Amino acid sequence: MANDEMMTRRNNWAEDPFFNNLGRRFFGPVGDWFDDFDRGVGATAMNGLPTDVKETKDSYQLKVDVPGVDKKDIKLSYKDHVLTVAVTKKEIDDHTDKDGNLLMSERTTGATSRSYQLPNVDAQHIDAQYTAGVLTVKLPKLTEITDSDNHIEIK
């Protein structure tokens, strides 16, 4: 039998429904107390699209972790100075062993997206590559700012 400790997920106390509901009664959402503390990192990790963004004088480069996703299920678009990465993770069909037992399942399915405001991008020359669960997007900068609506092909 599985160890009960393995099945217990450790959560931040501010995410605990008891404390959050108690705090909401008296002070509003408890989680809001930490908006400027550590919520940004936690929210990023929870949406499943942790990202590194690098800027040079000539371009921006993003590395987005999207493990377990087919390339065809990642959509990129750049419009009004905003790059949007949309990901759909298909249903997982290997939840059980041959006897139908499931000890724990934390892998999620569904859709999520994330947007990045990156001005002054040459949308016609955006390059995207997907290798080993990491999406790398290179966005060269323009010498003059223009508006564009562009969908990007992932290579």
Image: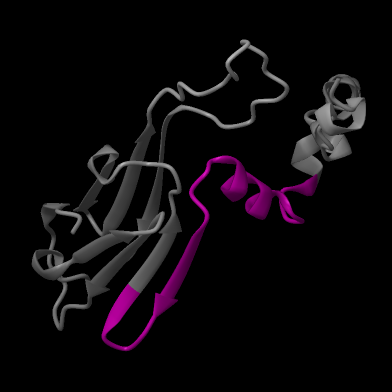
Look at 64% across and 30% down and name the residue there: 106
At horizontal 61% and vertical 10% (from top left) the residue drawn is: 100
The residue stretch that appears in magenta = 34-60
- Image quarter in which the N terminus is found: top right
The reply to whether residue 22 is in sight is yes
How far across and down, in percent of the image, does residue 11 sit? 82, 37
**Place of residue 62 in the rendered image (x, y in percent of width and height, measured from the top left):** 38, 66
Q: With 53 as the anchor, is 79 left or right in this view?
A: left
Q: Viewed as shown, does residue 144 lie left or right of 58?
A: left
Establish if 100 lies above or below 121.
Answer: above
- In percent of width and height, residue 82 lies at 29, 55
Quarter-of-image position of residue 6? top right
Q: In which quarter of the image is the C terminus?
A: bottom left
Q: Nearer the viewer, residue 101 or 33?
A: 101
Q: Residue furthest top?
A: 100
- Residue for point 54% across, 41% down: 47
